[in-house]
Image (cartoon, rainbow, N blue to C red):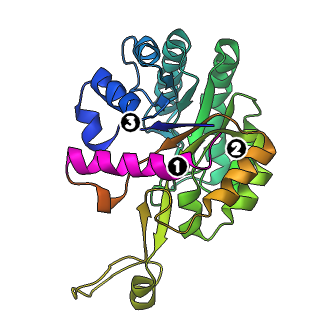
Amino acid sequence: MKLSAMLIDVLGKLPYEENVRWLADVGYPAVDPPLMEPQAGDIARKHGLEPGCANVGGGVVGSADAGDQTRIRDRVIEAIAWAAGEGVSALMVPHGRDTSIPTTEQLEGFKRVYGPAAEEAEKRGVNLTVENWPNNGKNLMFSPETWRAVFDAVPSDRFGLCFDPSHLVWLGIDYLQAARDFAPQIKYVHGKDTEIIVQGRNAYGIYGRQFSTSPGPGRWWRYRLPGWGVVDWPAFLTVLYDTGYDHIIAIEHEDPVWRGSEERFKRGLVLAHKYLSQYLV
């Protein structure tokens, strides 16, 4: 396995090749390129990096509006052609839901979008991945139940998960068992951790602060860089190795401790690389 970094936060404001050059200098062997970036693959490879997964962006796939679905489908298919031409192996695609309609009807939207898109991905050799991000209830594929339903509706070897254990931690889902159960569908992995803030949970419960303005945490968890939360990384990586995943782990840096400036953000990425590299071969 090898480490990549998502070019988010302050890095998203810098030129792509500048980011690639810096990642290579600090030891990253891969990069998640911006969608539709010209020569993204060639630029990454010129600096010795593998281009990983590009993010197609959001959208309400499980919608009652067929026009929305057509626009998302066309955007994904256009991205597949770009990825295949650039040698980008995976795309992260949207899974937004419309909570005003039943989930069974939302599944029809997933079929209309990802049925044709998966066929195109199969032809082009590109993986379509859905990150298991709940997005405050706005996304559908956040749990094993919902994964199973959508994968049954869209059965394709090119349509799978971008598996992020950090979301499952605060949802109370066993991320190790989920990774084992859905190993064939894991096409990409995000490296992100979750810190449990017991003081906040005890004071406010799982819904967080409602009225209080007193000092202290207003929520009971926060995202952290790998090694700074409760994810058991040796155990998680053991599951990945044991079940055959040997691709990229992309650092999704949303750690508030290591944000606020370009220098601080980059220090966080260096720390994440140092921590996870000890377990990767």
Residue 2 drawn above or below residue 170: above
- Residue 111: x percent and y percent? 67, 33
Q: Amino acid at mark 3?
A: Val
Task: Give how far apart the Cα atoms at labels 3 and 1 are.
Answer: 17 Å
For label 3, count other residues whose C-alpha is less than 10 Å away and answer few (under 14), some (14-19) or many (20+). Answer: few
From the image, state whether disc 3 or disc 1 is nearer to you: 3
From the image, state whether disc 2 or disc 1 is nearer to you: 1
Magenta-drawn stretch, dominant element (helix, strand or loop): helix
Whichever of callouts 2 and 1 sits on the residue coming sooner in the sequence is 2
Which of the 4 image quarters holds residue 7? top left
Q: Secondary structure at mark 2?
A: helix
Residue 162 seen in this snapshot: yes
28 and 217: which one is in front? 28
For label 1, count other residues whose C-alpha is less than 10 Å away and answer few (under 14), some (14-19) or many (20+). Answer: many
Residue at 31% in and 49% down? 267
What are the residue bounds of the magenta stretch?
261-281
| 183 relative to 76 in the view: left or right | right
Q: Amino acid at mark 2?
A: Val
Which residue is denoted by mark 3 in the rendering? 26
